[in-house]
Amino acid sequence: MRLYFALMFLTLLCTIVVQAGDDSKKDQQALQGTWRVVETTGSGEKLPKSDVDKVTFVFDGEKWFQKIGDTIDNKGVFQVHAGKKPKAIDLVNEKGATLLGIYTLEGKTLKICASLPVEKVAQKRPSEFSSTKENGCMLIILERTI
Protein backbone atom coordinates (compact mmCIF):
# COMPACT_ATOMS: atom_id res chain seq x y z
CA MET A 1 0.00 0.00 0.00
CA ARG A 2 2.85 2.39 0.81
CA LEU A 3 4.42 1.62 -2.54
CA TYR A 4 1.14 2.46 -4.27
CA PHE A 5 0.92 5.87 -2.55
CA ALA A 6 4.59 6.56 -3.26
CA LEU A 7 4.07 5.82 -6.96
CA MET A 8 0.94 8.00 -7.06
CA PHE A 9 2.86 10.84 -5.39
CA LEU A 10 5.76 10.54 -7.87
CA THR A 11 3.32 10.50 -10.81
CA LEU A 12 1.60 13.64 -9.50
CA LEU A 13 4.94 15.36 -8.88
CA CYS A 14 6.17 14.55 -12.41
CA THR A 15 2.91 15.91 -13.86
CA ILE A 16 3.32 19.18 -11.93
CA VAL A 17 6.96 19.58 -13.02
CA VAL A 18 6.09 18.96 -16.69
CA GLN A 19 3.15 21.42 -16.49
CA ALA A 20 5.38 24.13 -14.93
CA GLY A 21 7.95 23.57 -17.69
CA ASP A 22 5.25 23.89 -20.36
CA ASP A 23 3.95 27.11 -18.77
CA SER A 24 7.48 28.54 -18.68
CA LYS A 25 7.98 27.74 -22.38
CA LYS A 26 4.65 29.39 -23.21
CA ASP A 27 5.52 32.51 -21.23
CA GLN A 28 9.04 32.66 -22.67
CA GLN A 29 7.45 32.57 -26.13
CA ALA A 30 4.86 35.20 -25.15
CA LEU A 31 7.63 37.61 -24.07
CA GLN A 32 9.34 37.50 -27.46
CA GLY A 33 9.48 40.82 -29.27
CA THR A 34 9.97 44.50 -28.54
CA TRP A 35 8.55 46.21 -25.46
CA ARG A 36 8.42 49.95 -24.80
CA VAL A 37 8.98 51.09 -21.23
CA VAL A 38 6.04 53.24 -20.14
CA GLU A 39 6.89 53.65 -16.45
CA THR A 40 9.82 52.88 -14.17
CA THR A 41 10.00 53.29 -10.41
CA GLY A 42 13.21 52.62 -8.48
CA SER A 43 13.23 52.49 -4.68
CA GLY A 44 9.91 54.34 -4.66
CA GLU A 45 10.98 57.15 -7.00
CA LYS A 46 9.43 57.41 -10.45
CA LEU A 47 11.91 58.09 -13.26
CA PRO A 48 11.15 61.12 -15.46
CA LYS A 49 8.98 60.30 -18.47
CA SER A 50 11.57 61.95 -20.75
CA ASP A 51 14.11 59.30 -19.68
CA VAL A 52 11.68 56.37 -19.79
CA ASP A 53 10.32 57.19 -23.27
CA LYS A 54 13.68 56.39 -24.88
CA VAL A 55 13.99 52.86 -23.43
CA THR A 56 12.88 49.58 -25.04
CA PHE A 57 13.46 45.94 -24.16
CA VAL A 58 13.79 43.20 -26.74
CA PHE A 59 13.35 39.53 -25.85
CA ASP A 60 14.81 37.27 -28.54
CA GLY A 61 14.97 33.56 -27.76
CA GLU A 62 16.69 33.34 -24.38
CA LYS A 63 18.40 36.73 -24.84
CA TRP A 64 17.31 40.21 -23.79
CA PHE A 65 18.51 43.63 -24.90
CA GLN A 66 17.88 47.02 -23.30
CA LYS A 67 18.03 49.83 -25.82
CA ILE A 68 18.14 53.58 -25.34
CA GLY A 69 17.04 54.93 -28.68
CA ASP A 70 18.85 52.77 -31.24
CA THR A 71 21.82 51.95 -28.97
CA ILE A 72 22.03 48.70 -26.99
CA ASP A 73 22.72 49.79 -23.41
CA ASN A 74 22.62 46.41 -21.68
CA LYS A 75 22.08 42.80 -22.69
CA GLY A 76 22.13 39.27 -21.42
CA VAL A 77 20.06 36.13 -21.04
CA PHE A 78 16.82 35.48 -19.20
CA GLN A 79 14.83 32.60 -17.83
CA VAL A 80 11.22 32.50 -16.64
CA HIS A 81 9.74 30.29 -13.95
CA ALA A 82 6.01 30.37 -14.69
CA GLY A 83 5.22 27.68 -12.13
CA LYS A 84 6.13 29.94 -9.22
CA LYS A 85 3.64 32.26 -7.54
CA PRO A 86 4.12 35.02 -8.44
CA LYS A 87 5.79 34.07 -11.72
CA ALA A 88 9.56 34.58 -11.54
CA ILE A 89 12.15 35.88 -14.00
CA ASP A 90 15.95 35.87 -13.82
CA LEU A 91 17.80 38.45 -15.94
CA VAL A 92 21.56 37.95 -16.19
CA ASN A 93 23.58 40.63 -17.99
CA GLU A 94 26.77 39.98 -19.93
CA LYS A 95 28.88 40.99 -16.89
CA GLY A 96 27.22 38.23 -14.86
CA ALA A 97 25.05 40.45 -12.65
CA THR A 98 21.71 38.77 -11.94
CA LEU A 99 18.39 40.48 -11.30
CA LEU A 100 15.90 38.27 -9.49
CA GLY A 101 12.40 39.38 -10.33
CA ILE A 102 8.75 38.58 -10.69
CA TYR A 103 6.54 39.29 -13.68
CA THR A 104 2.99 39.37 -14.87
CA LEU A 105 1.86 39.44 -18.48
CA GLU A 106 -1.65 40.69 -19.22
CA GLY A 107 -2.50 41.30 -22.87
CA LYS A 108 0.04 43.80 -24.23
CA THR A 109 1.27 44.87 -20.77
CA LEU A 110 4.28 43.35 -19.02
CA LYS A 111 5.18 44.23 -15.44
CA ILE A 112 8.55 43.28 -13.98
CA CYS A 113 9.55 43.92 -10.39
CA ALA A 114 13.14 43.11 -9.46
CA SER A 115 15.53 43.64 -6.59
CA LEU A 116 18.09 46.30 -7.40
CA PRO A 117 21.60 44.84 -7.30
CA VAL A 118 23.67 45.84 -4.28
CA GLU A 119 27.35 44.99 -4.31
CA LYS A 120 28.23 42.02 -2.11
CA VAL A 121 24.66 41.65 -0.82
CA ALA A 122 22.58 38.60 -1.69
CA GLN A 123 19.44 39.56 -3.55
CA LYS A 124 16.01 38.52 -2.48
CA ARG A 125 13.32 38.00 -5.12
CA PRO A 126 10.37 40.38 -4.57
CA SER A 127 7.07 38.83 -3.54
CA GLU A 128 4.84 41.70 -4.69
CA PHE A 129 4.73 44.32 -7.45
CA SER A 130 5.84 47.39 -5.52
CA SER A 131 8.80 49.73 -5.40
CA THR A 132 9.49 51.52 -2.14
CA LYS A 133 12.52 53.02 -0.47
CA GLU A 134 12.31 50.21 2.09
CA ASN A 135 12.24 47.27 -0.32
CA GLY A 136 14.74 48.79 -2.79
CA CYS A 137 12.97 47.23 -5.77
CA MET A 138 12.57 48.45 -9.33
CA LEU A 139 9.14 48.23 -10.96
CA ILE A 140 9.01 48.45 -14.75
CA ILE A 141 5.80 48.59 -16.78
CA LEU A 142 6.19 47.83 -20.49
CA GLU A 143 3.87 47.71 -23.49
CA ARG A 144 4.36 45.49 -26.50
CA THR A 145 5.30 47.35 -29.69
CA ILE A 146 6.02 44.42 -32.02
Image: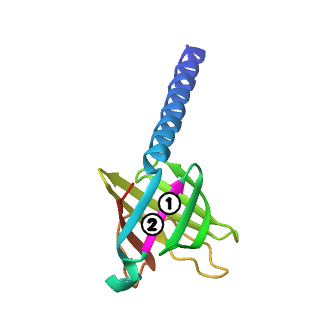
In front of the other: 99 or 63: 63
From the top left corner, tell me how far across and down residue 138 is, in percent. 43, 75
Helix, strand or loop status at disc 2: loop
Horizontal and vertical percent position of residue 36: 38, 66
Whether residue 95 is visible, yes or no, is: yes
The numbered mark, 1 or 2, whose residue comes first in the sequence reads 1
Say which residue appears at 54% left-offset and 22% top-offset.
11
Q: Please give the range of residues in magenta.
A: 55-59
Which disc number belongs to residue 2?
none
- Residue 102 on image: x %, y %: 44, 60
Q: Residues within 10 Å of mark 2 (few under 14, many from 20)?
A: many
**In front here: 124 or 54?**
54
Magenta highlight on residue 57: yes
Q: Quadrant of residue 110?
A: bottom left
Q: Main secondary structure of the magenta part?
A: strand
Residue highlighted by disc 2: 126
Residue 97 sits inside the magenta stretch: no
Residue in the picture at 51% in, 27% down: 15
Residue 92 horizontal side relative to residue 16, left or right: right
Q: How is the image coloured?
A: rainbow
Residue type at mark 1 is Val
| Cα separation between marks 1 and 2 | 23 Å
